[in-house]
Image (cartoon, rainbow, N blue to C red):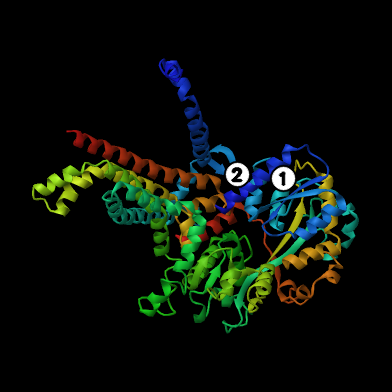
């Protein structure tokens, strides 16, 4: 339902966009739901005179399906790292001179030429963060130090646990806990993951990838699989006891980039936006809004007090940040099999 | 003018043209695409290879084991069974609850009937999602149903998860959503019923139950069948109830299709599941037509 609605809004936005002649002062962005601060867009529009139209998706898969469906009219989309890799391989993105943009000099050394785009020919950094779990510190006696607490929940968490409804994310987290590499093609590994998830299931209240902040705030659940920045928003706007865990086994990392789909009409406007967003002050507005870290040096100077002190946005150095990967067909089939068996 | 148009055979086709076009473009073409995709090879990252393959249908019953042999896998059949079971049960409950309501409404004076029918349709005025969220609040922990049941000790105090996010919640959601679709067609057929037949049965010393069983229900059968189809078919493909009220703890066929087109990125298998779902729908429609013809014949005898 939700998706259909989004598709509709998208279709309408596009219809409006394509009705008028393709002008250079127009930019169509397709991004995650609730991901861009309107203040940033207003500032960009005021500085460049380019008018921006934003449309939203809620999963990498949906974005991929849209791009595979043919020309979309989007000039900038924001896939996660493994989907950047897939989209490059499938010929869905075009190369753009990102390294020649003035503000590229601001990109932190460690985030330049990332493994998913070694030449930095397609992607400019947007935000990055991690996924693990959050809990109500006032209602749970544990300290969120290990994924053991999530997969083998204490009695007080029985029926008060929320797990994501996204098979890849859940399997990735389970892989971290079991010390299995992501995208395993070994059926024996898949069997161990399935056993772990089946043992966890009696304690699980529901599988859902949204509203964890609402459920944690009302204590309907006491622990929930969660994203760092989203958990930050829950702590600021919902309940102060919502605590994001950095388990010692590691957290699942994600890194979203700005990329330009093949056939995009307004490449110059897209480049202007990329350059604009690699400016420390501009990306800091974004970080203050969404609570996700960024790859631009010097942006800390513009962080709000809340973000500077936020544990969710400051990843401890001793916790491994393991980025999700693009799985092979065999690995994908195993994930699907684990999930169907878990839900049968 | 319009009468003249439909008099010749050519004119008749011309007049039917727009309707045929709509059915063709909006129903048959998408259906054809779906069936075609279900017989193709999946692409790793979504989409399909244009190559004939029955593998999607094989996958519904078999899976490859560690040595690459095909072994029987009942997993998807469980999901099919759960969908059929829940949809069937929801249909039964809708009938048991809906028939008396329709009967009651028909027995009111005409001006009251219209008001009552109007009341039955009121839930349709609100978006399905909003109604589902309302049920989350009603059924949820510390809700109006959960609290008294816990207090009475019907459910364990803390150990159990309550009603929400169980098969019961899915069932409640299905019954609630589709009940009006059972009441309305039964009402329509009862409204045309000649109540003198009911009185005649009483005159012949039939008690109320017997007149109901032997007179009213047989005459209302077309409406009942229509109601059964209208409830069973959408309930079979429902995925909102399973997702929101069932907490996605168990898959129904609708969720399985959704999963294949999204995260699993296996379009042919998703299409194949949809085709299998469609076959069950067609089968129940065929049964409906058969029964309808049969009762029609019996009644006309």
- Tag 2's secondary structure? loop
Q: In this view, does B185 lie above or below A275?
A: above
- Picture quadrant where residue A59 is located: bottom right
Tell me how far mark 1 sits from mark 2, CA to CA: 13 Å
Q: In this view, does A254 lie to the left or right of B95?
A: right
Q: Percent x, y for residue B17?
A: 48, 24
Number of marks = 2
> How many residues crowd mark 2 within 10 Å: few (<14), some (14–19), many (20+)?
many
Q: Percent x, y for residue B68?
A: 50, 52
Q: In this view, does B242 lie above or below A21?
A: below
Query: In this orientation, which residue lies closer to the viewer: A49 or B266?
Result: A49
Q: Percent x, y for residue A186?
A: 57, 61
Query: In this orientation, which residue lies closer to the viewer: B260 or A72?
Result: A72
| Residue A119 showing in the rendered view | no
| Residue A6 showing in the rendered view | yes
Q: Is residue A138 above or below residue B75?
A: below
Instruction: Report which residue position mark 2 lands on.
Output: B47
- Tag 1's secondary structure? loop
Q: In this view, does A197 lie above or below B158?
A: above
Query: In this orientation, which residue lies closer to the viewer: A152 or B22?
Result: B22
Which residue is located at x 59 percent, y 50 percent? A5
Q: Percent x, y for residue B62?
A: 44, 51
Which residue is located at x 86 percent, y 61 percent? A279
Residue A92 is labelled as 1
């Amino acid at each position: 339902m939700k998706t259909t609605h989004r598709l509709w809004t998208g279709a309408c936005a596009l219809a409006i966009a394509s009705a008028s002649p393709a002008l250079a002062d127009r930019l169509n962005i397709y991004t995650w739901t609730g991901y861009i601060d309107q203040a940033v867009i207003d500032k960009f529009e005021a500085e460049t005179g380019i008018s921006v139209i934003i449309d939203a998706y809620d999963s990498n898969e949906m974005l991929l399906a849209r791009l595979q469906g043919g020309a979309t009219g989007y000039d900038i989309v924001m896939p996660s790292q493994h989907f950047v890799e897939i989209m490059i391989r499938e010929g869905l993105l075009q190369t753009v001179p990102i390294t020649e943009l003035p503000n590229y000099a601001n990109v932190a050394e460690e985030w330049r030429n990332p493994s998913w785009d070694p030449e930095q020919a397609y992607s400019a950094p947007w935000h990055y963060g991690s996924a693990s779990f959050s809990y109500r510190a006032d209602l749970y006696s544990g300290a969120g130090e290990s994924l053991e607490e999530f997969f083998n929940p204490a009695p007080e968490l029985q029926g008060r646990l929320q797990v994501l409804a996204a098979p890849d994310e859940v399997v990735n987290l389970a892989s971290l806990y079991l010390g299995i590499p992501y995208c395993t093609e070994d059926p024996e590994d898949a069997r161990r993951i399935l056993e772990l998830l089946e043992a966890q299931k009696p304690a699980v209240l529901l599988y859902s990838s949204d509203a964890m902040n609402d459920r944690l705030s009302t204590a309907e659940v006491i622990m929930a699989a969660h994203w760092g920045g989203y958990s930050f928003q829950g702590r600021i706007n919902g309940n102060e006891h919502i605590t994001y865990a950095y388990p010692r086994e590691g957290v699942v990392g994600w890194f979203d980039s700005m990329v330009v789909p093949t056939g995009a009409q307004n490449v110059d406007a897209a480049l202007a936006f990329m350059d604009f967003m690699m400016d420390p002050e501009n990306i800091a507005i974004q970080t203050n809004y969404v609570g996700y870290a960024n790859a631009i040096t010097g942006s800390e100077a513009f962080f709000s007090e809340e973000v500077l002190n936020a544990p969710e946005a400051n990843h401890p150095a001793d916790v491994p940040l393991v980025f999700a990967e693009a799985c092979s067909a065999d690995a994908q089939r195993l994930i699907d099999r684990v999930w169907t068996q878990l839900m049968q | 003018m319009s009468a003249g148009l439909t008099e010749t055979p050519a004119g008749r086709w011309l007049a039917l043209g727009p309707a045929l076009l709509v059915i063709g473009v909006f129903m048959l073409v998408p259906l054809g695409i779906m069936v075609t995709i279900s017989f193709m090879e999946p692409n790793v990252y979504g989409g399909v290879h244009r190559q004939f393959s029955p593998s999607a249908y094989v996958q519904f019953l078999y899976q490859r084991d560690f040595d690459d042999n095909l072994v029987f896998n009942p997993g998807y059949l469980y999901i099919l069974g759960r969908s059929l079971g829940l949809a069937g049960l929801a249909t039964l409950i809708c009938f048991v609850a809906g028939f008396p309501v329709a009967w009651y409404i028909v027995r009111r004076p005409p001006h009251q009937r219209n008001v009552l029918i109007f009341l039955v349709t009121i839930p349709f005025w609100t978006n399905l999602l909003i109604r589902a969220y309302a049920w989350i609040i009603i059924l949820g922990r510390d809700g109006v149903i959960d609290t008294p049941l816990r207090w009475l000790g019907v459910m364990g105090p803390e150990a159990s998860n309550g009603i929400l996010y169980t098969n019961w919640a899915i069932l409640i959601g299905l019954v609630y959503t589709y009940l009006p679709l059972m009441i309305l067609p039964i009402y329509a057929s009862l409204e045309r019923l000649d109540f003198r037949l009911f009185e005649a049965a009483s005159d012949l010393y039939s008690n109320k139950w017997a007149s109901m069983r032997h007179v009213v229900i047989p005459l209302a059968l077309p409406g009942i069948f229509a109601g059964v189809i209208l409830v069973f078919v959408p309930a079979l493909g429902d995925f909102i109830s399973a997702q929101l009220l069932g907490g996605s703890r168990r898959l129904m066929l609708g969720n399985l299709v959704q999963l294949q087109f999204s995260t699993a990125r296996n379009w042919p298998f998703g299409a194949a599941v949809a085709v299998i779902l469609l076959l069950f729908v067609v089968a129940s429609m065929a049964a409906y037509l058969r029964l309808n013809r049969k009762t029609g014949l019996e009644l006309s005898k």
